[in-house]
């Protein structure tokens, strides 16, 4: 308990604390009797009370006023509480609900027959000092006569959770039941701490859970809270925070309103709401405090918020009747207590008159406020000076105000049920039972109401179960009634005012909402969006911002090959191997297949070069064939020349096998054809080089027989042997680990490269190595024979051709390895074409030049250099 509470506790509360320490109820009564004797008769405890005698007295605490002056804390003999201020007209029907229920029960022939209930109603003034003082007055029998009234055996009240906590703890040692009609703090459900507490309202745990469900349903992940600074408000926020854990909903801010410093707290809360991006505000506070808060928001021009109203103000006729709140409060969604009608209660209210209840100071004040006149015996002295005297003809029959509106009774009905719960508990205690004999003449023995103790009544209240007039079964579950709520929406009426409309209900944990019936705030009529960060669109993922709630995050785009196809995804998912992410990163699409196609520019260009090479080679062959009898063609074995032209044509042709989509057979044929064609070509050149060397060596003395050992047959055989070695290498390679088509996913992410793998690297290396070996040998031999004495030294041209050939294939290796995808194939084709054109031009163009342009030099004499 805080120091502030201790300082404000009156003498009666201190007496109760002594009682809890071991003093009996009689000591409390004696202490209060002593205090009663010492009090001035004009300052008795019933100045703010209403009493009706009976066999059993039901005490009730109603906060008819909501403000009090600062109490006098001086330790004097006449220490007393300050008078209450802030009269609340809507609380008068609560008082009359007790009066009506007691009178109805007293008239009932089946409920408590022969027993007359009485009531002692006092104003708690919405403050714990008044509440505790009034409770002590009622349970001790304090009255205007100071000790002649019956003590109350049960207390109905209070409205505030904080006051109910103090009441329950204070009265628990006396085993006096406390039945609240509006205290909804979840903390009061703990029967170990509050064994004597009951309530006819569900716990706020269900109300806060309902609001969390609503926030989740409408996608509000950024919700603010403005609550009363007491157990009611703080308890509701605590339950709300527990309910939203793991749901992606965050509490944007949490502001409290303390009535003693309301102006300061309201200014701070309104400034927070104004600065926050939250568009949905949870409000758990008394309706009078809510009015001040809303007016401050209007002053700050903050009118685009949606409020989630607690049951205290969700159906408040007081707020609905304030025109200045129409703009800001339109669209409010609220959790309301289930409403019910009380048969005959509307007639009772309209027939009320101060003359009928002359001791009811609450009714007198209402009467003066309603009719603008003053009752001579009214305690409202201020009205008597400024207002005319009431003539007694005033009537509530034609008055239309919240007091006479009984269409939707909520708190009033809760109070009505609390009185009936006490009555049924008493009825079960007063059941008449036959004595322990079989004599039928013996009358039933009934217990007297005077013998009933508060402890007996407390036990029976916890066991009470009855059916209401509306057909509902009433019982207490852990001191509370089962949760049943209505969901309401504040909408604009045809006359421009506000009214609340039922849009759903809550029964247990089941939430039922008619969304089409909701009127949202603002002129757009659209549901507000309340998020710290808008949900990440598909193609992005959430990245939590360090130091901020999980509702505040960045949206990072998914990397290539990953997607997120839902809104608000927390991670990106990698596409299957055969698929890749599209440009929006929200869908996996089949990867684009890539290979050197005959339809693309590069493929067409390479094919054109290859065909050109074939045509040129064929043209040279035709020229040589046509001039086969000329010396330049016959020189150096024309047969080898035609064989070389054939092999060059095969080299150009094999390059065509590399273009197009690779298949199993194309991969095998292209590499084998390439290896064999080039070995055939280089073999022919090598043999031609050897022939040149042998021919010139044979001109030396003693070497005339050398040419016989290397005649045409040996030349053809040498070519076949050299080529046969390559055939064997290719056959072994293709049989052991042949090339095959492969789908390469790792080179370019969005594409799958269809390429031919070499299969065995050793096999591929042997093929290239053998070609390179022959080329190097041929180059060396030609280099040695480059200065032979003749005008047409073919060895010189062979040297140049082999130099180009070797240079091309030396550059080919790094270029091939570093080129990705189809470009590696293009590099190989280019190497084939470049080396083939090099051989063709270096060896045959000089001869064609003489044949076609210098026919006079096409003589043996000229070729021999003579």
Image (cartoon, rainbow, N blue to C red):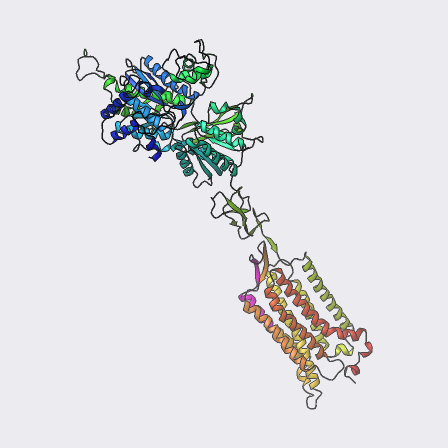
Q: Is residue 758 left or right of residue 221?
A: right
Q: Does residue 218 appear in this view?
A: no
Q: Does residue 450 appear in this view?
A: yes
User: In the rendered image, which quarter contains the N terminus?
Assistant: top left
> Splitting the image into 4 quarters, where does residue 595 fall?
bottom right
Q: Is residue 633 left or right of residue 108?
A: right
> Splitting the image into 4 quarters, where does residue 126 fall?
top left
Residue 479, position as x, y percentages in the image? 33, 28
Q: Is residue 65 left or right of residue 593?
A: left
First to last magenta residue range:
725-749
Q: Which residue is drawn at 58% across and 53% down?
A: 750
Q: Does the magenta stretch include residue 690?
A: no
Residue 787, position as x, y percentages in the image? 71, 83
Residue 543 lies, with reference to residue 335, above or below; the image says below
Q: Nearer the viewer, residue 634 or 34?
A: 34
Residue 559 lies, with reference to residue 740, above or below; the image says above
> Splitting the image into 4 quarters, where does residue 118 fall?
top left
Q: Residue furthest right?
A: 856
User: In the rendered image, which quarter contains the C terminus?
Assistant: bottom right
Residue 525, position as x, y percentages in the image? 57, 30
Residue 59 lies, with reference to residue 257, above or below; the image says above
Residue 744 lies, with reference to residue 718, above or below; the image says above
């Amino acid at each position: 308990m805080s120091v502030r509470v201790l300082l404000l506790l009156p003498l009666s509360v201190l007496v109760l604390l002594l009682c809890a320490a071991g003093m009996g109820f009689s000591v409390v009564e004696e202490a209060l009797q002593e205090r009663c004797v010492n009090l001035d008769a004009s300052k008795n405890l019933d100045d703010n009370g209403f009493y009706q005698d009976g066999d059993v007295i039901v005490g009730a605490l109603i906060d008819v006023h909501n403000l009090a002056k600062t109490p006098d804390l001086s330790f004097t003999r006449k220490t007393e509480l300050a008078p209450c201020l802030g009269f609340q007209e809507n609380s008068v029907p609560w008082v009359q609900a007790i009066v009506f229920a007691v009178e109805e029960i007293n008239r009932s022939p089946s409920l408590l027959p022969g027993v007359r209930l009485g009531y002692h109603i006092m104003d708690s003034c919405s403050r714990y000092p008044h509440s505790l003082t009034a409770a002590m007055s009622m349970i001790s029998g304090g009255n205007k006569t100071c000790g002649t009234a019956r003590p109350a055996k049960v207390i109905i009240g209070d409205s505030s959770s904080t006051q109910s906590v103090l009441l329950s703890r204070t009265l628990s040692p006396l085993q006096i039941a406390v039945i609240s009609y509006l205290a909804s703090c979840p903390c009061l459900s703990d029967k170990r701490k509050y064994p004597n507490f009951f309530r006819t309202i569900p716990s706020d745990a269900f109300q806060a859970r309902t609001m969390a469900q609503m926030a989740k349903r409408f996608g509000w992940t950024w919700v603010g809270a403005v609550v009363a600074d007491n157990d009611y408000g703080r308890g509701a926020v605590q339950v709300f925070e527990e309910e939203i854990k793991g749901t992606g909903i965050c509490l944007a801010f949490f502001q409290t309103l303390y009535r003693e410093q309301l102006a300061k707290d309201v200014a701070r809360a309104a400034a927070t709401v104004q600065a926050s991006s939250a568009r949905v505000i949870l409000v758990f506070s008394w309706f009078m405090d809510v009015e001040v808060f809303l007016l401050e928001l209007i002053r700050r021009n903050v009118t685009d918020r949606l409020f989630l109203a607690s049951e205290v103000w969700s159906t408040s006729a007081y707020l609905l009747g304030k025109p200045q709140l129409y703009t800001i409060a339109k669209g409010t969604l609220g959790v309301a207590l289930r409403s019910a009608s009380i048969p005959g209660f509307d007639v009772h209210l309209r027939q009320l008159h101060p003359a009928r209840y002359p001791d009811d100071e609450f009714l007198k004040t209402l009467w003066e406020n309603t009719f603008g006149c003053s009752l001579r015996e009214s305690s409202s002295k201020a009205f008597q000076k400024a207002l005319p005297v009431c003539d007694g003809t005033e009537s509530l029959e034609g008055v239309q105000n919240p007091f006479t509106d009984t269409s939707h009774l909520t708190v009033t009905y809760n109070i009505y049920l609390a009185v009936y719960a006490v009555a049924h508990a008493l009825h079960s205690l007063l059941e008449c039972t036959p004595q322990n004999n079989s004599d039928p003449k013996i009358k039933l023995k009934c217990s007297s109401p005077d013998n009933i103790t508060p402890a007996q009544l407390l036990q029976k209240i916890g066991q009470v179960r009855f059916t209401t007039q509306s057909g509902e079964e009433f019982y207490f579950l852990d001191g509370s009634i089962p949760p049943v709520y209505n969901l309401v929406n504040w909408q604009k009426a045809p006359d421009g005012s506000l009214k609340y409309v039922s849009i759903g209900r809550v029964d247990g944990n089941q939430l039922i909402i008619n969304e089409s019936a909701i009127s949202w705030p603002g002129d757009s009529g659209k549901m507000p969006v309340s998020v710290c960060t808008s949900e990440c669109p598909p193609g992005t993922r959430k990245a939590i911002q360090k130091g901020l709630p999980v509702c505040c995050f960045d949206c990072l785009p998914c990397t290539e090959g990953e997607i997120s196809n839902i809104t608000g995804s927390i991670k990106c998912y990698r596409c299957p191997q055969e698929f890749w992410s599209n440009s929006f990163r929200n869908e996996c699409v089949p990867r684009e297949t890539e290979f050197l196609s005959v339809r693309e520019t590069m493929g067409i260009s390479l094919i054109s070069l290859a065909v050109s090479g074939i045509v040129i080679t064929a043209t040279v062959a035709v020229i040589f064939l046509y001039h086969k009898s000329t010396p330049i063609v016959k020189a150096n074995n024309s047969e080898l020349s035609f064989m070389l032209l054939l092999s060059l044509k095969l080299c150009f042709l094999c390059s065509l096998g590399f273009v197009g989509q690779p298949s199993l057979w194309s991969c095998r044929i292209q590499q084998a054809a390439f290896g064999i064609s080039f070995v055939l070509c280089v073999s022919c050149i090598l043999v031609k080089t050897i022939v040149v060397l042998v021919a010139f060596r044979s001109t030396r003395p003693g070497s005339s027989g050398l040419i016989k050992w290397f005649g045409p047959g040996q030349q053809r055989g040498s070519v076949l042997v050299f080529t046969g070695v390559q055939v064997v290498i290719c056959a072994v390679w293709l049989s052991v680990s042949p090339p095959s088509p492969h789908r390469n996913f790792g080179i370019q992410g969005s594409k799958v490269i269809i390429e031919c793998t070499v299969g065995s690297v050793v096999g591929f290396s042997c093929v290239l190595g053998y070609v390179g070996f022959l080329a190097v040998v041929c180059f060396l031999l030609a280099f040695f024979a480059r200065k032979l004495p003749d005008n047409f030294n073919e060895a010189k041209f062979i040297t140049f051709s082999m130099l180009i050939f070797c240079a091309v294939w030396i550059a080919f290796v790094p270029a091939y390895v570093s080129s990705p995808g189809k470009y590696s194939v293009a590099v190989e084709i280019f190497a084939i074409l470049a080396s083939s054109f090099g051989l063709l031009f270096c060896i045959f163009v000089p001869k064609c030049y003489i044949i076609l342009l210098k026919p006079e030099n096409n003589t043996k004499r000229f070729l021999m250099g003579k």
